[in-house]
Every structure is written in C-alpha cells, then in structure tokens.
Image: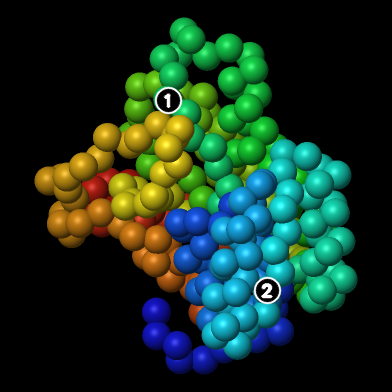
Amino acid sequence: MADQVNELEGKVAIVSGSARNIGRATAIELARAGASLVVNARESKDLCDEVVAEIEGAGGKAIACLADISDADAVRTMVDETIEAFGGVDILVNNAAVRSNIPFLDIDQAEWARIAATCLQGTLNLSRACIPLMIERGGGAIVSLAGLSSYKGSAGRSHVMATKDGLMGLTRGLAIEFGEKNIRANSAVVGRFDTERSANAPQSGYTTEPDIPLGRMGVSQDMADLVRFLVGPGSSYISGQTIHVNGAAYCPH
C-alpha cells in the first residue's frame, strides 16, 4: 500500500502476536499509516523491541508489551500501559495464535484448552478490555485473523478449526452488538502464506503453489495491507464480514 496519507494519525492500535510475521508487518504498516502501536508477544521481548525500534526509526510511536492474552489480568495490565502511553485504544488486531497438528483421537483436554486459550479466550479478553475504551473515543475497529483450514478442513487440526470458527462467530457478534457505538469488526482469513515458523511449530506442508491461481504464496505484507484498509476510513461501511486472502485458491460464495 502506498504511503498516501497518514489516515490513522491520532489512533492507537494493539496488535496481538506482533513480534513476527503477519503481526509484525501489520504493526509496522499501521504505524506507517500514522497510528501509535502496542507491539505484543507472550515472551519474545527482543523481537518486540526490534519492531518498536523499526517503528520509532521511521518516525512512529510504539511500545512493547509482553502479555499472555489468555490471562485476563495480563491483558488488563497491557491495556493500562497502553492508556498510560497513548491515552486509549481505537484499533484491535487479534492476530496471536498457536499452531498444532494432532490426530483427533489424540487431542486431550489440556491440548484443547491450550489452543482455545489463545485463539478464542485471548480474543475475548482483549475485546472486553478494549471495547469500552473504543466507546469512550467514539468508535473503533477490530480485525480478527482466522485460517483457511476452517473452511477447507484439515486432518489433525480439528481443535484449531473449532476455535477459529468460534473466533469468527465472536467477531460477527461484536459487529452486530457494537455497531451502534461506531465499532466495526471484521475477520480476515489467511490462506497459504510464506511465513517463518518456530522450530517446534508444525509445518504447513505447503511447499509449492500449483493450485493458487495467482501463482504464489501470500506474504505478510499482503495481510498487513488488508488490515490497514479494514481499520481505516476507507472501510467505514464494512463490518461483520469475512474476507479471504488466498490468491483465489479458495473462492467462497
């Protein structure tokens, strides 16, 4: 996206899971648009500090906040730090997630809870903490990121798909309930993206792009550009929607 205007000047954004990949690119892109950023991760302080340094080096404003978003108290502390630094919250990007690939019959209660804690409970915690602040400031925008496997299906990921479906349902509910407060909420579905994964994370298995009509995998900037649009003034009548970013590999109707 070209740097045409600082359309998010004066806005404050929290991007969960923004130390790497899509979250990192999104935080930097929103800062490029003029927003003040809260860069969040559970424990990757060095990486968060690198993102903050990049934003500040380009003339933007950002702070790093380590917080496990599945912990409501930790989220409250992060939001309090945001208020202290920037005065409030206007934008929430629910990007944090955990990856898992386990056969259904091997999923125990602990693994189910681990996935739901970040993918669903974390979004609930952040939304409950941020929405009152958005109301105080006259409105806001929420974008929640989901995965293509929730639509196409994938063996070994039923627990992840269940929580991501719940995430999208929650986001639609927020759009309806808080539309009268000028708060918009949308979901963005990530297709096959070329992102760095930690050493212990399950790999996607996507190594080629024969069935992606655009002929390539997505990159983090593709999603960052969409999020910038969805939280900006150009999408002021878009809410409650689910937008797919997959190079036409999957075309819902």
Q: Which residue lies furthest to the bottom in this view?
A: 5
Left or right, 107 with respect to 11, comes to left
Label 2 packing within 10 angstroms: few (<14), some (14-19), many (20+): many
Mark earlier in primary sequence (1, 2): 2
Residue 192 circle label: none
Q: Can residue 143 be seen in this view?
A: no
Tell me, for residue 62, which label it has, or none.
2
Q: Residue 101 carries which label?
A: 1
Image point 35% across, 35% down: which residue? 203
Q: Which quadrant holds residue 63?
A: bottom right
Q: Where is residue 215 in the image (x, y as percent from the top left)?
A: 15, 57
Residue 45 shows up from this direction:
yes
SS of the residue at dot 2? Answer: strand
At x 17% / y 48%, what residue is drawn? 209
Give the mark count: 2
Taking 239 as reference, is 161 above or below it?
above
